[in-house]
Amino acid sequence: MTDLAGKHGLVVGVANKRSLSWAIAQAAGQAGARLAVTYQGERLEENVRKLADQLQSPLVLPCDVTDDAQIAAVFEAIDREFGGLDFVVHGAAFAPQGELLNPFVETSREGFRTALEVSAYSLIALARQARPLMERRGGGSIVTLTYLGSIRVLPNYNVMGVAKAALEAGVRYLASDLGPSNIRVNAISAGPVKTLAAAGIPGLSGFLQAYRERAPLRRGIDAAEVADTAMYLIGPAGRGMTGEVLFVDAGYHVMGV
Ligand code: NAP
């Protein structure tokens, strides 16, 4: 098991107990890490505080990733409380519902901007703030979450697919920029899991069925499997890897039909 005793991490993107970021937070907490956990807006605060209490997280902070002041406040608090940072888990994504319901060709300028800002730019903004805190620790690991819709066309994924393509390209450019500081940046491309965000994608049950029928492992995946791979990327076993997209999807992406 990965040992993260003495390590400090930031987890962004916990909405509830089904969130992939929460599964990763739990695994990191069990491995001994101390965590800062953020929530987006007052609506989620109570729920996220209750979850974070389970891990005795010393920092539970608001962070809308479109708000630079909130991002800065999160890293100031981390600097005060932890004095440095070892890893960041980035699990924030959003696209307006209409952009997922309408044909892709109807994508609005505003919907495109929102999806790309929340789901892709946010990784750059967090990485920039994390850098000095990680440099103090001699390096760090940044892990984000992506989906196959970045490289394949999937029904109703639409502008989120474009946002995930930008996110994955961002992983590579950030890996190049931050590698000399021994900061690694990787993505996990997860198969579909029933979370709040996934529930917003029309036809999710059809996706899940397709994985059960056609993935090499003939099943879907669960959040704990994503968390295990995140532990690998965060912990010492992943020390030689950066700029990578690792699939945790029961092998679905290798199939032609
Ligand atoms: P989730 O529990 O709904 O988590 C998504 C999180 O992003 C929520 O906490 C959401 O908060 C947050 N978010 C949205 N806009 C934000 C903003 N402006 N600032 C800060 N946070 C914001 O769903 P999830 O499935 O675990 O998603 C986590 C990541 O995994 C996402 O990047 C998603 O694309 C990716 N992923 C998911 C699947 C899947 O099937 N579930 C598969 C592959 C990849 P709100 O609830 O307030 O919007």
Image: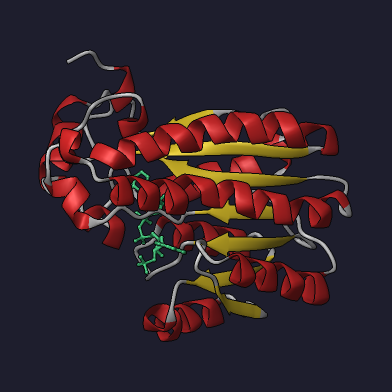
* Residue lying at the far top of the rendered structure: 256
Left or right: 140 in relation to 203: right
Quadrant for ligand 1 reads bottom left
Left or right: 82 in relation to 31: right
Q: Is residue 95 above or below residue 46?
A: above
- Quarter that holds the C terminus: top left
- Residue 157 lies, in percent from the top left, at 23, 40
- Which residue: 58% across, 45% down? 143
What is the image's colouring? secondary structure
Location of residue 5 (image quadrant)? bottom right
Q: Is residue 220 in view from this perspective?
A: no
* Count of number-bearing discs: 0
Foreground residue, 75 or 245?
75
Left or right: 232 in relation to 255: right
- Which residue: 89% across, 54% down? 136
Q: Is residue 38 in view from this perspective?
A: yes
- Residue 45 lies, in percent from the top left, at 45, 82
Q: In this view, does 9 lie above or below 17?
A: above
- Residue 240 lies, in percent from the top left, at 73, 28
- Residue 106 lies, in percent from the top left, at 16, 39
- Which residue: 17% across, 33% down? 105
Left or right: 166 in relation to 94: right
Foreground residue, 163 or 247?
163
- Which residue: 29% across, 40% down? 159
